[in-house]
Image (spheres, grey):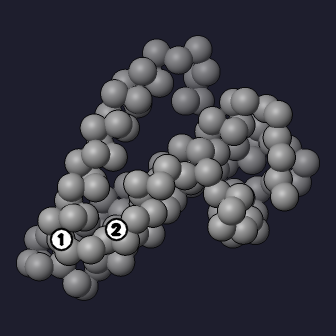
Amino acid sequence: MMVTTDRLATYVLRHADDNLVLAQRLGEWISRGPELEEDIALGNIALDHLGVARYLLQYAAELLGDGWTEDRLAFDRTDRQYSNALLVEQPNGDFAQTMARQLFVDAYQVPMWKAMASSSDDTL
């Protein structure tokens, strides 16, 4: 089990996990969207979240050191070692439920990223 006392690494990893799990959930809609435009849009949103997850996983691996890599953090942990918000791992349900979940995630992440822009940590 991965235990870290580095608060910044834990913080970064939590946000990476949120984005990684959400990207996977949104990716489940590819080729299943109600209309072609929604299908393509959800695929692109999933890719955006995957890109954020990769960036944050790389930074978390750098902070953790000790042989951790982006890939190890993404694939070599058990489900119990992920620290994502429960909201992002909820089943998609129908299209409306997925959009409602995305609204709540965006309502949280937009102000969070605005606050991060003024962080003393240049990487964030």
Q: Secondary structure at mark 1?
A: helix
Residue that protrudes farthest toward the right in the picture: 66
Pick the quarter of the image with the N terminus. Answer: bottom right
> Would you name the residue on which mark 2 appears?
26
- Left or right: 54 with respect to 90? right
Where residue 82 appears, x then y in whole percent?
64, 57
Q: Residue at x 18, y 71 (%)?
A: 95
Q: Look at the picture and state if 111 lies above or below 73.
A: above
Left or right, 105 with reference to 53: left
Q: Residue furthest bottom?
A: 31
Report the amino acid beneath label 1.
Phe
Q: Is residue 77 left or right of residue 93?
A: right
x, y percentage for residue 62?
A: 76, 42
Identified at 28% across, 55% down, the residue is 101
Q: Quadrant of residue 76?
A: bottom right
Residue placed most toward the observer, 77 or 70: 77
Residue 70, position in %: x, y? 69, 57
Dot 1 corresponds to which residue?
A: 95
Residue positioned 20% across, 74% down in the render: 94
Q: In the rendered image, which quarter contains the C terminus? A: top right
Question: Circle 2 — which element?
Answer: helix
Vertical comparison of 29 with 22: above or below: below
Where residue 54 sits in the image (x, y, percent)? 56, 54
Q: CA distance from mark 2 to mark 1?
A: 10 Å
- Sort mark 2 into few (<14), some (14-19) or many (20+) by Cα contacts within 10 Å: many
Q: How many marks?
A: 2
Mark with earlier residue (2, 1): 2
